[in-house]
Image (tube, helix red, strand yellow):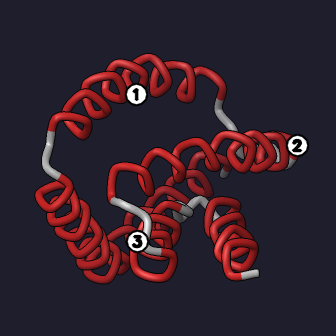
C-alpha cells in the first residue's frame, strides 16, 4: 500500500510538471529502504508512462510547443546518456549528496525566483496586450 501511495503522489507531482522524482527517490530510499542507484533507476522507469499521460493531457490543452520540445529532447537525450554514466560510476553516498544539494538548490530557486518570474510573465502579458491595440 505504501508503494501505491508513493506512486500516486509521484503521478500528481509529475502531472503538475514539478517532478515526481523529487518525491519518489527520497521516499524509496527512506521509507522503503531502496539503494540510491536503484531508486533513481526506478524513478526514471516509472516516469515514462507518467510523462506520456501528462504530455498527452498538456498537448490536448495546447500547452506543448512541438518545436521547443524537439530541441529540448535532442539536448536531453545526450545529457541523459552522460548523466546515467556518471551516476553509475559514482558512489551511492556521493550520489545521494548530489541529489540532496540539487533538491535544496531547486527549492531555494523556486522560493526566491517566483516573484521575478511573475514580473517577467506580467511584462510579457502587457507586451502582448500592447501589440494588439
Q: Answer with mark 2 or mark 1, whichever residue precedes in sequence.
A: 2
Q: Name the residue under label 3.
A: 29
Q: Name the residue under label 1.
A: 76
Vertical position of residue 47 compared to residue 24: above or below = above
Q: How many labels does the image show?
A: 3
Q: Answer with mark 3 or mark 2, whichever residue precedes in sequence.
A: 3
Q: Image point 59% across, 59% down: which residue?
A: 17
Percent x, y of residue 30? 40, 80
Percent x, y of residue 74? 44, 17
Q: Answer with mark 3 or mark 1, whichever residue precedes in sequence.
A: 3
Q: Residue 103's quadrant in the figure?
A: bottom left
Vertical position of residue 100 compared to residue 133: above or below = below
Q: Is mark 1 on a helix, strand or loop?
A: helix
Q: 10 Å neighbourhood of mark 3: few (<14), some, or many (≥20)? A: some
Question: Is 85 or 56 nearer to us in this picture?
Answer: 85
Q: Mark 2 points at which residue?
A: 60
Q: What element carries label 3?
A: helix
Percent x, y of residue 57? 84, 49
- How far is mark 3 from mark 1, CA to CA? 25 Å
Question: Is 109 or 119 nearer to us in this picture?
Answer: 109
Mark whose residue sits in front, 3 or 1? 3
Q: Image point 31% across, 27% down: which residue?
A: 79
User: Looking at the rendering, in which quadrant would you find the N terminus?
Assistant: bottom right
Amino acid at each position: 500500500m505504501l508503494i501505491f501511495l508513493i506512486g500516486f503522489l509521484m503521478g500528481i507531482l509529475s502531472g503538475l510538471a514539478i517532478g515526481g522524482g523529487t518525491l519518489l527517490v527520497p521516499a524509496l530510499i527512506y521509507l522503503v529502504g531502496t539503494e540510491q542507484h536503484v531508486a533513481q533507476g526506478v524513478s526514471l522507469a516509472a516516469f515514462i508512462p507518467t510523462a506520456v499521460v501528462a504530455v498527452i493531457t498538456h498537448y490536448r490543452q495546447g500547452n506543448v510547443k512541438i518545436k521547443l520540445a524537439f530541441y529540448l529532447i535532442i539536448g536531453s537525450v545526450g545529457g541523459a546518456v552522460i548523466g546515467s554514466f556518471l551516476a553509475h560510476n559514482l558512489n551511492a553516498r556521493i550520489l545521494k549528496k548530489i541529489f540532496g544539494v540539487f533538491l535544496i538548490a531547486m527549492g531555494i530557486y523556486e522560493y526566491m525566483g517566483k516573484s521575478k518570474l511573475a514580473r517577467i510573465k506580467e511584462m510579457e502579458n502587457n507586451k502582448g496586450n500592447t501589440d494588439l491595440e
